[in-house]
Amino acid sequence: MTVHPPGPPVWALPGLLRKLAVDRLGMMRDAAELSDAVRVSMGPKKLYIFNRPDYAKHVLADNAANYHKGIGLVESRKVLGDGLLTSEGDLWRAQRRNVQPAFKPGRIAAQAGAVAEESGRLVDLLRQRAGDTPVDVLQEVTGLTLGVLGRTLMDTSLEGHGGIEHAFEAVQDQAMFDMVTQGLVPTWVPFGTQRRFRAARRDLTRIVDALVADRSARLRDGDGADDAFARMILAAREREDPALGRRLLQEELVTLLLAGHETTASTLGWTLLLLARHPHVRDLVREEARAVLAGGRLPEADDLHKLTYTTQVVQEAMRLYPPVWILPRIAQAPDEVGGFTLPAKADVLVCPYTMHRHPHLWADPERFDPTRFEPSRVANRPRYAYIPFGAGPRFCVGSNLGMMEAVFVTALVTRDLDLTLVPGHRAVAEPMMSLRMRGGLPMTIRSAD
C-alpha cells in the first residue's frame, strides 16, 4: 500500500513555495513544525522533507546507493563541474579514493603545526588592529582558512591570489540562482548574478591554472606527493584523455578550494559571535586555553584532546549553525522511508539545521549550551540527531582538519583577545554551501586581561 508523508495545509502551501526562493531556512523550519515527514508539491515536482534521525540514517547511510545528490547540488554542477562535492557513481568513488589518504588522521595530526602557526598569525593580525575601529573578523578568519588549506592540503601558498573568496561568493550566488530558476536561464543572459559569475569563473580558471602549473613543476622537481592537490594532479596525468583530465583537475581543485575553506570560516564566524554574546562561556574557554596552552605557546596535536570544553563550544556552534546545513538527494529507485513510499526521482531533503533544533531531541533547542556535548549526554542521544558534516559514505572528508582548525583558532583568539560585537549588528544566516554570515562580523578588538 502506498503511504505518502502528509502535505502542508492548503493555506500554508503558497508560503512554503515562496520561501523556497527567498527564505530556504524559513521553509525548512515551517516544514519541520508541520511534521517529521512532509511532502510539498511544486507542480509535477514533489519535495520529501525528512526530519528524524532514523529517516536520515536510511537515506544517507543504510540505502545511500539509492540516493544521488539532489536539488541545489545538481545546479551547482553547472558552476562547479564534477568535483568531489557534486560528482556521482564511479567518478566520485575514484576521486574520494584518490584523496582519502591526504585526510588520514596521522597525516592531519602532522599538520597541527601548520594549523597552529596560521592560527597564531591570525591572533597577531587581530591584535595589531585592536582599538575602537571595527574589524570584519569574518573576513580575517576567511583569510586564515585559505592559508591553512594551502599549507595542509595543497603544499602551496595561496598568497598573491587575492579575491578567491569573492569569486566563490559569485559562484555560490549563481548556484542559488540556478536552483530558483531550475537551471532554465542560460549563463550568457546579462543578469547581474550571471555577469558576476562569468567574471568569477574567468578569475578562478586563471588562478587554478597558475596553481596547477606551479605544483606540477615542483612535482617534476621531486617534491612530495602526499597532499590532496598533488594526488589530483597525478590522477589527471593517468587519464587516457588529457583534455578530460585537465577539465576534471580544474573542477576538483575549484571544489577543494571552496569546500576546504568556506565551511570552516563559517563555523569560526558563528563560534566567535556566540562567544561574544555569552561572556560566561567565553570566560570558561579562556580559562581552559590558558591552562592547556600556558605561557602563550601555540597548540600541538596532543592539545586537541585537552581542549575539551573548547571542542564542546565548537560542536554546539555547529549544532546551531551546521556547516552542512542541508543534504539534498534524488531517489534513483522507489523506496520506503519510515513507512512512507517514495517514487523514483523523488527529491528528498534532510536538514541538519532543523534536526539540530528538534524539540524532542534537544532540550531548549534554541539555547546555546556547550554542555550538551559532555560525553554522558552524547551517549544518550541518537547517532543521527547530530550530523554537522553529513553522514554515510559522503561524510565530509575534511571534518578532522576542520575541527582541529576551529578548536585551535577559538582557543587562541579567546585566550589572547576580547572581541566585542559592534552595537546594532544583526547576524543573518545566508544558506549557501554553508550557513555563511551575511554582512560580515564587525567587532572591536582588545587584548584580553
Image (cartoon, helix red, strand yellow):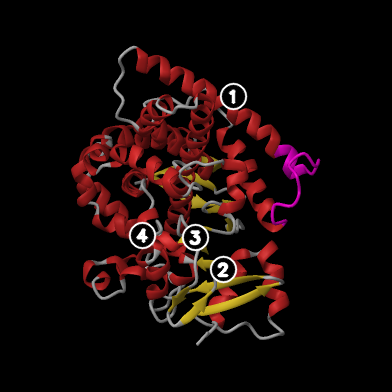
**Residue 282 visible in the current orientation:** yes
First of labels 2, 4 by sequence position: 2
Q: Nearer the viewer, mark 1 or mark 2?
A: 2
The residue sitting at 38% across, 26% down in the picture is 234
Whether tag 1 and tag 2 are in contact, CB under 8 A, the answer is: no
Distance CA(mark 3)–CA(mark 4): 15 Å
Residue extending furthest right?
Answer: 190
Q: Mark 3, residues whose alpha carbon is within 10 Å: few (<14), some, or many (≥20)?
A: many
Element under disc 1: helix
Looking at the rendered structure, the secondary structure element under dot 2 is: loop
> Which label's residue is closer to the chain start, 4 or 1?
1
Q: Mark 1 or 3, which is nearer the eye?
A: 1
- Tell us which disc is closer to us: 2 or 4: 2
- Identity of the amino acid at label 4? Gly
- For disc 3, the marked residue is 325
Q: Main secondary structure of the magenta part?
A: loop
Q: Is residue 194 magenta?
A: yes
Q: Which residues are magenta?
A: 181-196
Left or right of 254, for residue 21: right
Badge 4 is on which residue?
A: 392
Residue 359: x percent and y percent? Answer: 44, 80
Q: Is residue 376 or residue 93 the one in the foreground?
A: 93
Task: Say which residue label 1 marks.
Answer: 206
Q: CA distance from mark 1 to mark 3?
A: 30 Å
From this view, report whether residue 298 is shown above or below residue 265.
above
Marks 3,4: beta carbons within 8 A: no
Q: Earlier in the sequence, mark 1 or mark 3?
A: 1
Q: Earlier in the sequence, mark 2 or mark 3?
A: 3
Tell me what residue is drawn at x 44 percent, y 41 percent: 260
User: Of label 3 and label 4, which has the lower sequence position?
Assistant: 3
